[in-house]
Image: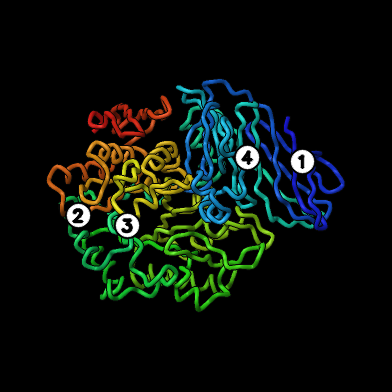
């Protein structure tokens, strides 16, 4: 039923194969009801590029395919055969240089199915559903430790492909390698998701069920200091009964990578003092780090160039992201890097006393395969290192391929960053940051519409793979490009579909009405999503129960117009 296509390099020469058994390898596909396994046996030494199996699958007009994006920020939603999903947007393709840097956070340099109607791909798991129905058929990988599993559809040509990203994998003659271990589960959405995440993958209920509070990023970005943080901490007092966590984001450190060198002009009493002040309020204390990143002008990057990853092709230092003027990536397989990362977390968690770390830009570790390992194996190794370094303290992941951290991280971002404008308009932009993030170069760049879409269509991860973090909502009026209806809509979507609920507003500026909205959105309620789908290109319908009461939220992504007040 499945056609095979394999790309590899043997004795320095590239080759492709379509036969299951040949002079280079054999491939055995074991199909049973509810599962699919693929075992690859090398007959010669080789380096793998890709392996894919393709079968026919009929797609009607009402059929939908759910594509889980490459990492936490990447667009994830259901698609029909008439939809199209672009890869890098045209402004990013002006030169090879701009295309390379715009594509760092995604899979654009190794994935192909972008920009054509009816062609889509997603990672780790996918499902098929008929519009209006709750019954689904899910295909899901047990683990990404052998390589990322990519599910692709060509809905126009009625094809379904399962691909293993094994680029860079070195195999010896006689070596056996498990390419696929995939569950195929049919039934009601909730029942299928429970069976996949709990029974097949082996996830346990996350240690975090519900968190609500504050994070500093979306009001001040890096422009924080001790006075701002303590003022905003006090500002939550009127809603304190519904607050459980207060998080300090980027801006406290000397530079990204120099985590243990606090900027003492901004935080003269140090970070333990901040954690103690948060604890005095009765809240958990959270703090942000990008543990695999080292800002180009950081002390770490200058002092330890041997710790930095280098490109396979030219040996130059590898940039993992464009932020902060550029940041290099640390090599987790270097013993001194591993020791440094463990020292950082021991200090942050056990000396400073923070309870949770938000760990960002983690995808940077697996941009290229190396050391004979696949991207998926490298990412899983990185996640394991972070779990080991943090012990039983809480980890909130961000900017990470989700399949690598399911059942390991306590909570995880499920969307891109929001934007401080509901929809970007150059003439209405608030500042240079809004301009930079408003011009969309890829599917990971900050966008309120994309964040809301991901939050809704990844709702099934909450309480199964980890606790969902849908990013912040806003209630303030200062330095924001939302109207009140849009603020309420965004807050309601987050509370229905997630359980890590943050604002970056100084609640001390709120009037009584906004304090009540804040407490309402922070309140821990029993939510269940019954149905979520696009009614048109612009309109989303979200059917849910709230403490047993059935409600329907319908809204426009373009304008934010909705019936949200009926659902409050």
| Residue named by callout 4 | 182
Is residue 185 at least partly visible in the picture?
A: no
- Look at the numbered discs 2 and 4 and tell me whether their residues touch, using CB distance below 8 Å: no
Residue 392, position as x, y percentages in the image: 43, 61
Viewer-proximal residue among 453 and 342: 453
Q: Which mark is residue 217?
A: 3
Structural crowding at the residue carrying mark 3, measured as other residues with C-alpha within 10 Å and reported as few (<14), some (14–19) or many (≥20): many
Q: Earlier in the sequence, mark 2 or mark 4?
A: 4
Say whether residue 298 is left or right of residue 141. left
| Label 3 secondary element | helix
Quadrant housing residue 519: top left
> How far separated are the C-alphas under marks 1 and 3?
50 Å
Q: Quadrant of the N terminus?
A: top right
* Image point (70%, 47%), residue name: 50
Q: Nearer the viewer, mark 2 or mark 1?
A: 2
Say whether residue 238 is left or right of residue 30. left
Residue 428, position as x, y percentages in the image: 29, 45
| Residue named by callout 2 | 236
Is residue 387 at least partly visible in the picture?
A: yes
Say whether residue 174 is left or right of residue 535. right
Colouring used for the render? rainbow
> How far separated are the C-alphas under marks 3 and 4?
39 Å
Viewer-proximal residue among 431 and 337: 431
Q: Earlier in the sequence, mark 1 or mark 3?
A: 1
């Amino acid at each position: 039923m499945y056609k095979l296509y394999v790309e590899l390099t043997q004795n320095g020469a590239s080759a492709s194969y379509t036969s299951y058994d040949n002079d280079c390898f054999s491939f055995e596909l074991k199909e049973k009801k509810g599962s699919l396994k693929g075992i690859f046996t090398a007959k010669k030494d080789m380096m793998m590029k890709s392996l894919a199996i393709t079968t026919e699958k009929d797609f009607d007009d009402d059929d939908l395919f759910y594509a889980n994006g490459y990492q936490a920020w990447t667009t994830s939603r259901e698609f029909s055969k008439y939809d199209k999903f672009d890869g890098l947007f045209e402004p990013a393709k002006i030169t090879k240089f701009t295309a390379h840097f715009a594509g760092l956070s995604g899979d654009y340099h190794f994935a192909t199915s972008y920009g054509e109607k009816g062609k889509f791909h997603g990672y780790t798991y996918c499902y098929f559903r008929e519009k209006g129905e709750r019954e689904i058929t899910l295909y899901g990988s047990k683990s990404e430790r052998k390589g990322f599993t990519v599910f692709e559809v060509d809905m126009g040509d009625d094809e379904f492909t399962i691909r293993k990203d094994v680029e860079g994998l070195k195999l010896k003659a006689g070596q056996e390698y498990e390419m696929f271990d995939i569950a195929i589960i049919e039934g009601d959405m909730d029942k299928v998701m429970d069976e996949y995440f709990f029974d097949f993958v082996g996830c346990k209920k996350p240690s975090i069920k519900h968190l609500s509070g504050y994070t500093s990023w979306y009001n001040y970005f890096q422009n924080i200091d001790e006075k701002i943080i303590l003022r905003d901490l006090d500002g939550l007092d009127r809603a304190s009964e519904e607050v459980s966590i207060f998080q300090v984001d980027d801006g406290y450190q000397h530079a990204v990578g120099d985590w243990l060198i606090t900027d003492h002009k901004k935080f003269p009493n140090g970070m333990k003092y901040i954690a103690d002040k948060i604890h005095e309020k009765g809240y958990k204390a959270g703090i942000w780090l990008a543990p695999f990143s080292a800002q180009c002008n950081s002390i770490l990057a200058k002092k330890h160039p041997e710790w930095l990853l280098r490109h396979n092709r030219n040996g130059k230092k590898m940039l993992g992201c464009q932020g902060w003027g550029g940041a290099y990536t640390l090599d987790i397989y270097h013993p001194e890097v591993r020791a440094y990362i463990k020292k950082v977390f021991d200090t942050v968690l056990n000396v400073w006393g923070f309870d949770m770390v938000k760990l960002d830009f983690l995808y940077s570790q697996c941009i290229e395969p190396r050391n004979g390992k696949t991207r998926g194996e490298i990412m899983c190794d990185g996640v394991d290192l972070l779990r080991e370094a943090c012990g039983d303290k809480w980890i909130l992941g961000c900017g990470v391929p989700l399949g690598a951290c399911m059942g390991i991280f306590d909570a995880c971002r499920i969307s891109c960053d929001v934007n401080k404008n509901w929809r970007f308009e150059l003439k209405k932009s608030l500042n240079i940051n809004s301009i930079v993030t408003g011009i969309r170069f890829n599917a990971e760049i900050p966008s309120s519409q994309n964040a809301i879409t991901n939050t809704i269509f990844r709702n099934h991860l909450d309480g199964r793979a980890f606790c969902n973090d849908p990013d912040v909502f806003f209630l303030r009026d200062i330095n924001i490009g939302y109207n009140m209806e849009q603020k309420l809509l965004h807050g309601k979507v987050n509370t229905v579909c997630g359980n890590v609920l943050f604002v970056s507003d100084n609640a001390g500026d709120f009037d009584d009405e906004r304090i009540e909205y804040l407490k309402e959105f922070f309140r821990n309620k029993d939510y269940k999503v019954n149905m979520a789908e696009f009614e048109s290109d612009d309109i989303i319908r979200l059917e849910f129960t709230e403490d047993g009461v059935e409600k329907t939220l319908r809204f426009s992504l373009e304008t934010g117009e909705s019936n949200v007040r009926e659902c409050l």
